[in-house]
Image (cartoon, rainbow, N blue to C red):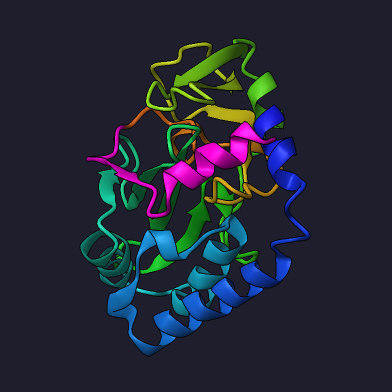
Amino acid sequence: MKMWCLLCRSLVKNAFQTLVLLMFANNAFADDPKNFQFESIVSTDEMQKVIQENFPLGSSKASLRKQFVSEGSATLKLHPTQAGVEKYIYDINLCSYYIWRWNISADYDANDHLLQAYVNGEPVFASGKQKKNVDTFAKTGKAAILKMQRPRPEAVKGEKELAFIMLDADGDPSTIDDQVLNGGGPTRADPFNMGFVHVYINVEPWRSIFDFDAAEKIVNYQGDCAKVDEFYAHH
């Protein structure tokens, strides 16, 4: 949390630069989708916009897999219990201060058409399926509140553990379809300016930045980590 507060001081200073990068990323994608890289999308708001503009409801599963898996090199994970539900996860090591996770998940109908997309567990389309109603959890009589941590040992200079609180309707962590979590995470994959702390509320763990599935690899930040170290040494 301290790290994000320090980085927020540069938010105004970097505002114009951020706008230019956003325009460049969106234009580059529009001109040539094959150029898509997860690193070209810096913020969660940008990713929401990319999906809204390029993959409206009804889009094919093949088109999302093409961008995020074939072109973006994300790791494909099928939901272990729900048919037609899958996710594309991509991890970036921000100079060992934080391991950023993109968790893009999607629900498809029986004909492999998009019903809803999620960015780190947050629904993209207002007209699609929304988050679970946690009021039904309490009615089970077995609900448990669990304090949990997602280890990120690669972040040796910063956030090595991500803490969250999980509500489990049947009190059994091994059954994942009746779980939601509350936790916080940054909004930008930029070690110089990680935005603000977004509080995820009633997000399914499997769709979140806290899920325990491993990406096939953790990609290194494309910038100069020596400059990042220097930045933190003076803040």
Q: Does residue 1 appear in this view?
A: no
Whether residue 51 can be seen here = yes
Residue 193 is left or right of residue 27, and the answer is: right
Count of marks placed on residues: 0
Give the image location of residue 221, x and y in percent: 39, 48
Q: Is residue 212 above or below residue 204?
A: above
At x 39%, y 74%, the residue is 59
User: Who's the residue at 43% across and 26% down the image?
Assistant: 176
Q: Which residues are magenta?
A: 214-235
Q: Looking at the picture, does residue 138 appear above or below residue 83? A: above
Residue 181 in the image, given as x and y percentages of width and height = 60, 29
Q: Give residue 224's position: percent from left, percent from top.
A: 42, 50
Q: Position of residue 125 (x, y in %)?
A: 59, 65
Closest to the observer: 127 or 117?
117
Does the stretch in magenta take in 91? no
In the picture, the quarter occupied by the C terminus is top right
Residue at 38 percent of width and 89 percent of height:
31
Q: Is residue 227 above or below residue 137?
A: below
Quadrant position of residue 174: top left
Q: Nearer the viewer, residue 97 or 103?
A: 97
Quadrant (top left, top right, bottom left, bottom right) of the N terminus:
top right
From the viewer's perspective, is 12 left or right of 122? right
* Pick the front one: 50 or 122: 50
Q: Is residue 202 left or right of residue 149?
A: right
Tell me what residue is drawn at x 66 percent, y 36 percent: 234
Note whether 126 is above or below 77 in the view shown: below
Q: Residue furthest bottom?
A: 31
